[in-house]
């Protein structure tokens, strides 16, 4: 990580649950790169207290916010701007949760209340965050917002369940809001489509161990780690990527453009 790449930049990082979380690595790398930021997560996730260790290490402040609550989000931006001494330059949206996945409901036996919750937590929360920030004028010009997504938005991975719809919606919000926020305030918005990664959310998907090995063998470079994903996020928060916006960016070792690899072919010979 290039020290000083984010010097003087201020941000908000959603979604650091424990040291496996992608957001946790982003916070560590952002700190290393010279940024200051607040950390936020749902009040229930903060109860474990893990995040306080990260906050201490990064001279950060933890601000509880359920990302589906407009009131919590407004409070989050107000408190963050007060702590950071001004508007923010970057936001990481690293949030995902499906009650259908958690409760083992099959895709074709979905519980629609759960489905709504999946969409609200995993996708609409980004819209709510952006709308709140824009109304409060809380993000500086050329600021950068990054959301994390998965290739199940484009292709079927049967056990990804209703999270596939959530990720499609999330990527669409990046494009649409990227237009509006870009035109009016030059704020850029992108999604990173990350390789399967061992984290609490990732491991919740059925058959995850087999799947992560399959993805690794299908990718010419192998699966991208959480740390490498964090480094990619830092590059998108930096001024080196000022004109990148409204994109879904694959960070997957080449998986998305590979039809089949020799390693996988050999298993059928
Ligand atoms: N792990 C993978 O294989 C993988 C692959 C591609 C994309 N992603 C995406 O990366 C992001 C981060 O996930 P992760 O793998 O680091 O797992 P994680 O479990 O560490 O992070 C998910 C976070 O979402 C938070 N969250 C849930 N409900 C919330 C709410 N209502 N308000 C605020 N926060 C809430 C959780 O508390 C948790 O911190 C997610 O969007 C996930 O879908 C993960």
Image (cartoon, grey):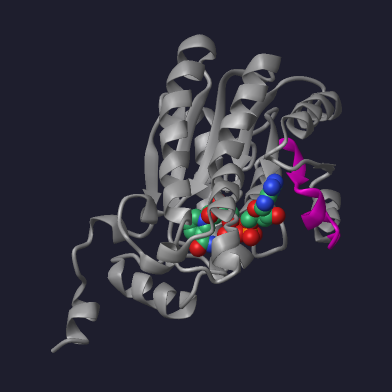
Query: With 96 as the anchor, is 71 left or right in this view?
Result: right
Query: With 40 as the anchor, is 52 left or right in this view?
Result: right
Tell me which residue sits at (45%, 65%) in the image: 109
Q: Is residue 165 magenta?
A: no
Q: Is residue 155 above or below residue 181?
A: below
Residue extending furthest toward the top: 184
Q: Is residue 182 visible?
A: yes
**x, y (%) of residue 195?**
43, 60
Quadrant in which the C terminus appears: bottom left
**x, y (%) of residue 25?**
64, 55
Tell me which residue sits at (18%, 63%) in the image: 259
Q: In this orientation, which residue lies closer to the viewer: 248 or 4?
A: 248
Q: Is residue 46 above or below residue 69?
A: below
**x, y (%) of residue 101?**
54, 65
Tell me which residue sits at (72%, 20%) in the image: 87
Tell me which residue sits at (41%, 24%) in the image: 243
**x, y (%) of residue 196?**
46, 64
Q: Which residues are magenta?
A: 35-49
Q: Quadrant of ligand 1?
A: bottom right
Quarter assignment of residue 158: bottom left
């Amino acid at each position: 990580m290039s020290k000083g790449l984010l010097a003087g930049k201020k941000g908000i990082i959603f979604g650091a649950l424990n040291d496996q979380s992608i957001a946790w690595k982003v916070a560590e790398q952002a700190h290393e790169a010279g940024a200051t930021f607040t950390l936020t997560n749902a009040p229930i996730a903060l109860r474990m207290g893990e995040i306080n260790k990260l906050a201490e290490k990064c001279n950060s402040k933890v601000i509880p916010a359920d990302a589906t609550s407009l009131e919590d989000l407004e409070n989050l931006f107000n408190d963050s701007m007060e702590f950071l001494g001004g508007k923010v330059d970057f936001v990481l949206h690293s949030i995902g949760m499906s009650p259908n996945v958690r409760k083992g409901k099959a895709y074709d036996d979905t519980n629609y209340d759960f489905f709504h919750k999946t969409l609200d937590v995993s996708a609409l929360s980004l819209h709510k965050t952006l709308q709140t920030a824009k109304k409060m004028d809380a993000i500086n010009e050329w600021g950068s917002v990054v959301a994390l997504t998965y290739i199940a938005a484009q292709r079927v991975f049967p056990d990804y369940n209703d999270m596939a719809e959530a990720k499609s919606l999330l990527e669409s919000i990046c494009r649409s809001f990227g237009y509006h926020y870009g035109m009016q305030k030059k704020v850029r918005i992108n999604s990173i489509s990350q390789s399967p990664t061992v984290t609490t959310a990732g491991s919740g998907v059925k058959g995850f161990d087999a799947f992560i090995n399959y993805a690794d063998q299908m990718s010419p470079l192998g699966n991208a780690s959480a740390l490498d994903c964090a480094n990619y996020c830092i590059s998108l928060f930096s001024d080196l990527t000022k004109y990148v916006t409204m994109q879904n960016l694959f960070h997957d070792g080449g998986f998305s453009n590979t039809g089949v690899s020799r390693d996988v072919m050999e298993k059928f010979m």
